[in-house]
Image: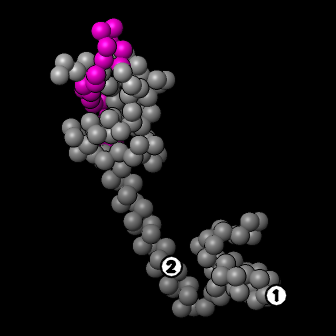
């Protein structure tokens, strides 16, 4: 029996795949548990429409991420933080502060998990960081300066 898999089934198929399986396995296990639906001509046509729409949306999202990364590549972001007399930060530099600076200066919303800086930034100075959006990466510069106010 030909099925369209709705969910990933380990060792059998991934969601979205159309595959032939034995009738008993399909009728007694996969279909009753909502893991697959029978691949009728209408179901296959609907599946192809959804797949094409999803592929188009994925391509659009990837193009947007690439555009955002191009805006960020090589950019320098100045972050004003409170420090003591020895130029040590009162608290570790947070991804929230970096994301806010990027959003404010470039208008690009960056998820916190996409921001990567080497080690812990605890003093003022110049640092490099990396932004990962999907498969696209940008290197940014962070200029940490003491806030006088």
Q: Is residue 68 above or below residue 125?
A: below
The quarter of the picture where residue 8 lies is: bottom right
Query: Is 89 in front, or is 10?
Result: 89
* Residue for point 61% across, 76% down: 6
Which residues fall within the magenta stretch?
A: 69-89
- Marks 1 & 2, CB-CB < 8 Å contact: no
Q: Is residue 43 visible?
A: yes
Which residue is found at the position 23% from the left and 45% from the top? 107
- Left or right: residue 15 versus residue 9 is left
Residue closer to the observer: 112 or 88: 88
Label 2: state its secondary structure. Answer: helix
Q: Which mark is residue 24?
A: 1
Q: Position of residue 18 (x, y in %)?
A: 64, 77
Residue at 32% x, 25% y is 142
Q: Which quarter of the figure has residue 75?
A: top left
**Which of 20/36 is in front?**
36
Q: Mark 2 = which residue?
A: 48
Q: Secondary structure at mark 1?
A: helix
State the separation of the CA atoms marked 1 and 2: 26 Å
Q: Is residue 58 shown above or below 22?
A: above
Image position of 88 (left or right of 11): left
Image quadrant containing the N terminus: bottom right
Residue 33 is tagged as none
View extreme (left): residue: 149
The first of marks 1 and 2 along the sequence is: 1
Is disc 2 surrounded by few (<14), some (14 to 19) or many (20+) residues within 10 Å? few
Q: Is residue 66 magenta?
A: no
Indicate the position of residue 149 as horizontal and vertical percent values: 17, 22
């Amino acid at each position: 029996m030909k099925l369209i898999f709705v969910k990933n089934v380990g060792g059998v198929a991934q969601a979205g795949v159309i595959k032939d399986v034995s009738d008993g396995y399909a009728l007694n296990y996969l279909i009753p548990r909502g893991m697959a639906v029978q691949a009728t001509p209408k179901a296959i046509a609907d599946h192809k429409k959804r797949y094409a729409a999803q592929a188009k949306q994925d391509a659009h999202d990837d193009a947007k991420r690439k555009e955002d990364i191009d805006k960020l590549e090589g950019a320098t972001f100045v972050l004003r933080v409170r420090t003591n007399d020895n130029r040590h930060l009162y608290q570790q530099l947070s991804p929230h502060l970096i994301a806010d600076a990027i959003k404010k200066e470039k208008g690009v919303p960056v998820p916190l998990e996409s921001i990567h800086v080497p080690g812990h930034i605890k003093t003022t100075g110049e640092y490099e960081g990396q932004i990962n959006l999907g498969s696209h990466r940008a290197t940014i510069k962070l200029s940490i300066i003491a806030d006088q106010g």
